[in-house]
Structures are given as C-alpha cells and as structure tokens.
C-alpha cells in the first residue's frame, strides 16, 4: 500500500489497484503538488463539508465516475449534485472492495458558505479509519483534542495517523502531540498547517513534542510504503 501527502489535509492511498483520495482540496491549495486534471481517483472520502476539505470533490468525482464516501447529510447533498455516493455516519463501518472504512468522531464544524450569505449545514464532521492489506490508517479530519482518541487507538491499533497541527481552527502542536500519545500510532504525520496565514506552524515543533511516538514530516507528494 502506498500513502502520500499532498498539502493541507490531502491524503492519497493506493491499494488493490484502486486510488483513494481524502479531502481533495487542490484548487486554491498553494501547498499541493497535485493538479486536478491529473488526479484519477476511484474513490473520494470527505471528512466534512468545509470548502478546504470538500475541495474539488464534485469535479473529480464527475470526471472519474468516482464513489464519494461521506456522512449522510454531506453525501445526500453531493448526490443532489449528481455524484455516486455511499452514505455513512460516525461509529459506522463498511467493507468496500478496496478497504474497510469507519468514521470516527471529530470535534469541529461543517457547512458550505453560499454566495447569498447562507450556510448549508452538511452533517457532523468525522475522522476516518481506513483498513486494508492488514494495515490501519487514521485521518482525523479537522478536530480538537479529545480523550476518546485513546479508545480509537486501543480498538484499532494504528500503523499511520494524520493529525492537524495548525491551531486556530484545530489542534495546535501541543494538543496534537498529546493526541499522538493517546492514539499510539506507529507513525504520525502532521497536516493542516501553513496553507493560510492563520495556521502557520513549524511542523518540527510538533515532532519535538512527541514522547516515544515516531513523527514524520512529509513534503507534498512524498510517499510512504506500508
């Protein structure tokens, strides 16, 4: 299995001949190495309905006939946009042909801002557990620190975790380092930082705060083999 990071919260997983992309915020993401026209996903997983996570989902899904996995409200909204969706919700899991996917809690908000100053509510934000080839990956989505991360790590021993460190909208480096301790992943990668001025962080600060956890800073496009 190949797992790559592409700036902000964009993660790509290649397994079983399928390509899965999580939170494909490409257009407007100054840190990504990706171009929308070059991304060919079989499946897209969206953690929540903010624009910097929903990103290019609609364009990518239509261009590639990709399945979109999201919470029920967000999935319904995307189905109304003509997409092929699989509705899920927090605590639920489903065995797809490429992986088992489970949604976990995330403490954040969600919703799209319209041009006429309305907010479309798109369900509760979530994290993602992705289980394939005997490995388990955790993408927390946007979230604060919460104590049940310990249960996530105990129930699903993690090979790889992606945690936000940008602060302001999510955990900062200090809380993310404590989250890494609770989760106990073999490798933890920081995400959701430096895309905007308000979330500027030095990822090395997060790495230095880790106890015995293995932290890894990934450059956009860098690949890990699991």
Image (cartoon, grey):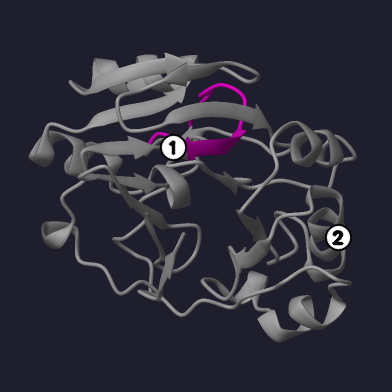
The answer to whether the residue labelled 1 contacts the one labelled 2, judged by CB atoms less than 8 Å apart, is no
Q: Position of residue 81 (x, y in %)?
A: 23, 23
Q: Position of residue 131 (x, y in %)?
A: 50, 37
Image point (42%, 65%), residue name: 225
Residue at image point 79% right, 68% down: 213
Residue 26 in view (yes/no):
yes
Q: Quadrant of residue 214?
A: bottom right
Tell me the residue at 18%/56% (across/down): 39
Which residue bears the numbered disc 1?
A: 46
SS of the residue under disc 1:
loop
- Specify the segment rendered in magenta: 116-131
Q: Secondary structure at mark 2?
A: helix
| Residue at the spot of label 2 | 175
The relative height of residue 221 versus residue 128 in the rendered view (above or below) is: below
Q: CA distance from mark 1 to mark 2?
A: 23 Å
Q: Is residue 119 above or below residue 193?
A: above
Mark 1 burial class by Cα count in 10 Å: few <14, some 14-19, many 20+: many
Closer to the camera in the image, 96 or 75? 96
Residue furthest front as drawn: 134
213 sits to left or right of 165 = right
Does label 1 or label 2 sit earlier along the sequence?
A: 1
Q: Looking at the rendering, which quadrant does residue 171 occupy?
A: bottom right
Q: Quadrant of the N terminus?
A: bottom left
Identify the residue shown where x is 58% and y is 34%. 110
Q: Is residue 127 above or below residue 1?
A: above
Viewed as shown, does residue 57 lie left or right of 163? left
């Amino acid at each position: 299995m190949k797992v790559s990071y592409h700036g902000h919260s964009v993660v790509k997983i290649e397994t079983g001949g399928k390509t899965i992309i999580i939170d494909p915020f490409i257009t407007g993401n100054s840190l990504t190495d990706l171009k929308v026209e070059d991304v060919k996903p079989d499946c897209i997983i969206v953690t929540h309905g903010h624009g910097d996570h929903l990103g290019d989902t609609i364009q990518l899904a239509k261009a590639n006939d990709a399945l979109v996995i999201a919470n029920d409200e967000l999935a319904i909204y995307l189905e109304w946009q003509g997409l092929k969706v699989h509705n899920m919700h927090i605590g639920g899991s489903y065995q797809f042909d490429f992986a088992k996917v489970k949604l976990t809690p995330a403490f954040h908000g969600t919703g799209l801002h319209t041009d006429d100053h309305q907010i479309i509510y798109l369900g509760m934000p979530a994290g993602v557990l992705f289980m394939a080839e005997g490995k388990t990956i955790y993408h927390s989505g946007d979230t604060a620190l919460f104590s049940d991360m310990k249960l996530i790590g105990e129930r699903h021993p993690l090979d790889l975790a992606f945690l936000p460190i940008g602060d302001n909208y999510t955990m900062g480096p200090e809380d993310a380092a404590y989250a890494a301790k609770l989760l106990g992943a073999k490798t933890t990668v920081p995400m959701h930082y430096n895309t905007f001025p308000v979330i500027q962080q030095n990822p090395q600060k997060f790495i230095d705060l880790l106890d015995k956890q293995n932290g890894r800073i990934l450059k956009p496009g860098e690949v890990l083999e699991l």
